[in-house]
Amino acid sequence: MKNDINNIIINCLRGDINAQRALYDLYVDRLYYVVYRYVNDTYYIENILQDVFLKTFNKLETFDSNKASFTTWINTIAIRESLNHLRKKKLTFVPYEEATIDISAEIDPIISKMDAQELMYLIATIPEKLRIVFNLYEIDGYNHNEIETMLGIKASTSRSYLTRAKTHIQSVIGLNIT
């Protein structure tokens, strides 16, 4: 697979339309779900995906396989384009008092047993701002300092939003909140 993607990238850089189509076909479904986790509107998802692939093809020469895998690189583009879309909606993150409870120990084992469809449904139930932080932290692996930079919020606000997202999940899956 790695050699296949390398050949596709090389041919894309040469302007081969068939290679561009192969790259699109290889990643469109994966990226759809990356964007969907942030933006729950099919109309906008399709527009964002167009932007992701335009940016991918326009910036392909900057991809460095020594820094990240291609999948990581293109996922990052999808996440950033999703966040750019959300910024245009003028989302504001209001600081919450930082919660001191940690419910990860109760939720994480349950989430890890879910299939992709169940997890996507669960994530879709989280209110938008909380969902953004949850996705960045729990799914995409960013830390709170990185989220602070990406969203222009304090790390403590990121932690509070994450806790509230997990509390929401806890209520959806029926765990007792203690």
Image (cartoon, grey):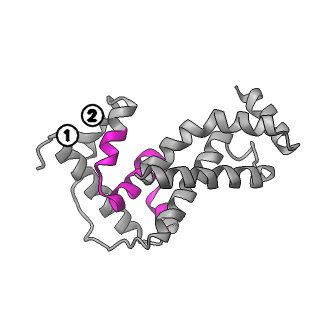
Is residue 18 visible in the rendered structure shown here? Answer: yes
Q: Hey, which quadrant is residue 106 in on the image?
A: top left
Residue sitting nearer the eye, 28 or 105: 28
Is residue 69 visible in the rendered structure shown here? Answer: no
- Residue 51 within the magenta-colored segment of the rendering: no
| Residue at (70% x, 53% y) in the render | 54
Amino acid type of the residue tagged 1 in the rendering: Ile
Where is residue 8? Give x, y as percent. Answer: 78, 34
Give, as a single range, the part of the protein colored magenta. Answer: 120-148
Q: Secondary structure at mark 1?
A: helix
**Residue 157 placement, left or right of 17:** left
| Residue at (67% x, 44% y) in the render | 68
User: What secondary structure is the magenta-colored segment mainly?
Assistant: helix
| Residue at (41% x, 67% y) in the render | 155
Q: Hey, which quadrant is residue 117 in on the image?
A: top left
Residue sitting nearer the eye, 52 or 47: 47
Tag on residue 110? 2
Q: List the residue tagged with mark 1.
A: 173
Decide which of tag 2 and tag 1 comes sooner along the chain: 2
Amino acid type of the residue tagged 2 in the rendering: Ile
Tag on residue 12? none
Q: Tell me: residue 96, above or below residue 129.
A: below
| Residue at (75% x, 27% y) in the render | 4
